[in-house]
Image (cartoon, rainbow, N blue to C red):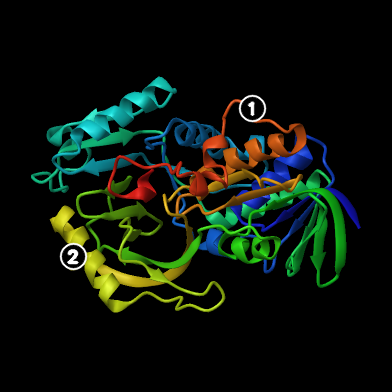
């Protein structure tokens, strides 16, 4: 079989790239997935869609992606199940200046975000405790979407534009002749192509290692708790991240909401193919304690369950994007460190253009190049929590 481009990994990023390559660029695309579309970490993403970043290219990616999520049925087809709820970031005392600088940058790039003092934060929901809050940043157009629905819709749309989607078909080996990629070997035979994008999340280093490409990507386990409040109480209506207490909350249906940590350490490094997929009692208890501190009305909140998924984490908590030096036609999109979902529509779009034209469009992703680690050119967030960006 021969294709113009092969995408390895049908999570949100790989499926997005396949869609843009097939629909906009008319490429003959094969999308390979070791399991089922959206069945890996994408399907267990909390799905938060926000614009708050500290680095211009990330903000540009988030803004473009939010526009796609908001008009997904028209732009892509199908549904990402996007819910516009608003997004609130809470910064502790001492970080007001960082928050304000980030908001200025976001606004300069077209973002609709506002700095809130304590009184304005309380106006969003008077149940929020604000005595230990320095400032907040609020985005009215942000919210959350569904990872599985997003990846499935991207893959289905790619298929409508002629792409071949092969589930339960892992990439066994990347094929290279001289200094150029020539395709991918699968259990069902070889597929020849002039371009290969590896978007395989935690499994990416395993594929690239035999080519002598070493990426500093660790696979870590991260947990999510599903809470429920009893009537007549209701969850907060918006998504929020609390930097002071190191956790996030995202509303869901039926009086339920998700919660988890945004702290980098301590983390738990695990094998990608074998890890505890449940939530630990100690973690659930800790998240409930942090939640009750910020929203005292949620003291004694019910727990509906929990689960764990995987992050593919880089040293600076930012993704590895772009061409592999020394091997023409080989590209990487991995190492998203827990915040790739919200960027996936624009990353797929931008990388599709790079694969076809050899250059970036409006959003320059060169700072995320694979060589930045060896060059000492890491991307550092001014916040203590790298996942915030």
Q: Callout 2: few (<14), some (14-19), or many (20+) C-alpha neighbours within 10 Å? A: some
Tell me where residue 133 sits by quadrant: top left
Residue drawn 20% across the image and 38% down it: 95
Position in image of residue 140 (x %, y %) = 36, 33
Residue named by callout 1: 361
Q: Is residue 168 above or below residue 356?
A: below
* Foreground pick, 79 / 7: 7
What residue is disc 2 on? Answer: 289
Which residue appears at 29% of the width and 43% of the height?
Answer: 383
Q: Secondary structure at mark 1?
A: loop
Residue 88 in the image: state x and y as whole percent.
29, 41
Instruction: Judge left or right: residue 383 versus residue 319.
Output: left
The residue at the point 41 percent across, 40 percent down is 50
Q: Between tags 2 and 1, which lies in front?
A: 1
Q: Could you classify mark 1 by the number of other residues whose Cα lies within 10 Å: few (under 14), some (14-19), or many (20 or more)? A: few
User: Is 284 positioned to the left or the right of 93 in the image?
Assistant: right
> Looking at the image, which residue sits at the far left?
131
Q: How far across and how far down the image is residue 353, in percent? A: 70, 34
Q: Residue furthest right?
A: 1
Residue 162, labelled with which disc?
A: none
* Inter-mark Cα distance, 2 to 1: 45 Å
Q: Is residue 77 above or below residue 304?
A: above
Q: Is residue 295 visible?
A: no
- Residue 54 shows in the view: yes
Q: In which quadrant is the N terminus drawn?
A: bottom right
The quarter of the rendered structure image containing the C terminus is top left
Q: Secondary structure at mark 2?
A: helix
């Amino acid at each position: 079989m021969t294709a113009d481009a092969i995408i390895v990994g049908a999570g949100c990023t790989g499926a997005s790239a396949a869609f843009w390559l097939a629909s906009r660029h008319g490429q003959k695309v094969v999308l390979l997935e070791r399991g089922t579309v959206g069945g890996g970490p994408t399907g267990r993403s909390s799905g938060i869609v926000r614009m708050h970043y500290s680095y211009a290219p990330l903000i540009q990616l988030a803004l473009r992606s939010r526009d796609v999520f908001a008009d997904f049925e028209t732009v892509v087809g199908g549904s990402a199940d996007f819910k516009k709820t608003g997004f609130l970031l809470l910064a502790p005392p001492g970080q007001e200046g960082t928050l304000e600088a980030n908001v200025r940058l976001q606004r300069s790039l077209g973002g609709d975000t506002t700095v809130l003092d304590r009184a304005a934060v309380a106006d969003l929901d008077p149940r929020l405790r604000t005595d230990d809050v320095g400032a907040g940043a609020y985005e009215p157009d942000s919210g959350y979407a569904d990872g599985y629905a997003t990846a499935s819709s991207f893959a289905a749309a790619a298929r409508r534009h002629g792409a071949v989607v092969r589930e339960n078909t892992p990439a066994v080996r990347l094929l290279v002749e001289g200094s150029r990629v020539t395709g991918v070997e699968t259990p069902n035979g070889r597929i020849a192509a002039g371009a290969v994008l590896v978007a395989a999340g935690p499994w990416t280093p395993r594929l690239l290692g035999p080519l002598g490409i070493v990426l500093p990507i660790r696979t870590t386990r991260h947990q999510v708790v599903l809470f429920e409040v009893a009537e007549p109480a209701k969850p907060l209506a918006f998504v929020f991240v609390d930097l002071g207490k190191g956790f996030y909350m995202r509303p869901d249906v039926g009086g339920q909401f998700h919660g988890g940590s945004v702290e980098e350490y301590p983390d738990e490094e695990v094998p990608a193919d074998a890890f505890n997929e449940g939530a630990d009692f100690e973690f659930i208890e800790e998240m409930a304690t942090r939640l009750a501190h910020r929203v005292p009305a949620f003291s004694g909140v019910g727990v509906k369950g929990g689960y764990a998924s995987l992050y593919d984490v880089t040293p600076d908590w930012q993704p590895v994007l772009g061409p592999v030096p020394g091997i023409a036609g080989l590209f990487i999109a991995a190492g998203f460190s827990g915040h790739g979902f919200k960027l996936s529509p624009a990353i797929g779009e931008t990388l599709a253009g790079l694969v076809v034209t050899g250059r970036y469009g409006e959003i320059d992703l060169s700072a995320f190049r694979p060589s930045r680690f060896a060059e000492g050119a890491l991307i550092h967030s001014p916040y203590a929590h790298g996942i915030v960006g």
